[in-house]
């Protein structure tokens, strides 16, 4: 049975970006797993920056928001029919440098360059991914990194390495999804594509799939305010963007290497 594995940096990214295609794949009989990398609890020694305090106050989820966010994710993926896997790595806003200072203390910082001290984290994520069983017929879908969020950059790099480390002679096809809502800004997608030789793949969505996507996004109650004024605005913007991508017909867009092989880096 064909299957798909979506790597999601955070507990909402895959659904925000690919919720329609996920539910359509499930309806077609495929097994879909969403692996969220930065789904771990708040570390005992975590950043207590004003930025973190602001986020916690807005989310209203207590001292350990990831626990409640994992429940939101399970509810969202339940609507789509996908399986949830949560890895234990903490979100970038909680991570500290060697001197105990927050690595990413502001909103601008999380959309900047991955800190040099975090390069070993990519290898840690790869090791965690290698413990997952990858079905022989699986396709792996990674974030394109539109928006340039540091956690998205780390997940893309780790995902590419993981796919290259499969048993000899076995090729794992990779596709990249446009990170929504950052992809609403065309320049963000262009910047993420950069010099890569990728071609687009349009995934048309039927009305049931679009409705399921909207319902699943609504499960992330604590996160709605991060991107939208309210649920009504979310519903409108998700449909508007889907119709823009599909030229009037709701759609999501993937990107893949022209030969459909993993990146040869």
Image (tube, rainbow, N blue to C red):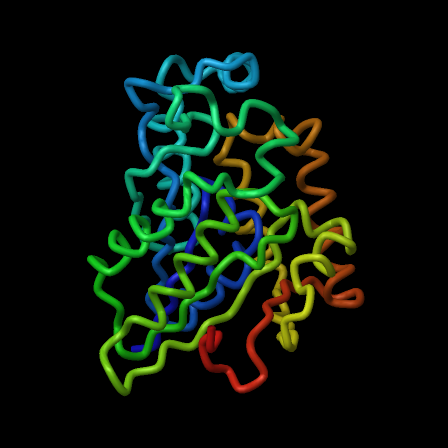
Q: Is residue 180 left or right of residue 4?
A: right
Quadrant including the N terminus = bottom left
Q: Quadrant of residue 242?
A: bottom right
**Image: 226 above or below 194:** above
- Residue 219, percent across and down? 48, 36
- Residue 28, percent across and down? 42, 72
Residue at x 65%, y 47% (from the top left corner): 147
**Image: 75 above or below 258:** above
Q: How many marks?
A: 0
Frontmost residue, 63 versus 158: 158
**Image: 119 above or below 94:** below
Residue at x 51%, y 70% (from the top left corner): 175
Residue at x 39%, y 40% (from the top left corner): 38
- Residue 120, percent across and down? 35, 47
- Residue 35, percent across and down? 35, 52
**Image: 7 above or below 50:** below
Q: Is residue 5 left or right of residue 141?
A: left
Residue at x 54%, y 65% (from the top left corner): 176
Frontmost residue, 265 versus 223: 265
Frontmost residue, 171 versus 118: 118
């Amino acid at each position: 049975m064909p299957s798909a594995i979506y790597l999601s940096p955070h507990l909402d990214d895959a659904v925000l970006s690919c919720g329609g295609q996920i539910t359509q794949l499930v309806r077609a009989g495929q097994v879909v797993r969403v692996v969220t990398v930065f789904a771990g609890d708040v570390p005992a020694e975590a950043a207590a920056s004003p930025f973190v305090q602001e986020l916690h106050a807005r989310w209203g989820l207590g001292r350990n928001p990831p626990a409640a966010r994992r429940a939101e994710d399970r509810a969202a993926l339940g609507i789509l029919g996908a399986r949830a896997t949560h890895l234990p790595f903490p979100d970038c806003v909680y991570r500290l440098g060697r001197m105990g200072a927050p690595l990413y203390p502001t909103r601008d910082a999380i959309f900047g360059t991955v800190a040099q001290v975090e390069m070993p984290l990519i290898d840690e994520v790869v090791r965690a991914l290698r413990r997952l069983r990858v079905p022989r017929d699986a396709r792996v879908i990674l974030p394109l990194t539109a928006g340039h969020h540091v956690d998205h950059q780390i997940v893309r790099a780790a995902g590419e390495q993981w796919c290259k480390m499969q048993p000899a002679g076995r090729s794992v096809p990779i596709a990249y999804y446009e990170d929504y809502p950052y992809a609403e800004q065309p320049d963000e997608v262009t910047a993420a594509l950069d010099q890569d030789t990728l071609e687009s793949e349009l995934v048309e969505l039927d009305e049931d799939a679009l409705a399921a996507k909207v319902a699943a996004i609504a499960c992330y109650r604590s996160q709605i305010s991060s991107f939208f004024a309210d649920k009504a605005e979310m519903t409108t913007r998700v449909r508007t963007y889907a119709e823009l991508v599909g030229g009037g017909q709701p759609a999501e867009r993937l990107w893949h290497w022209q030969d459909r092989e993993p990146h040869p880096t």
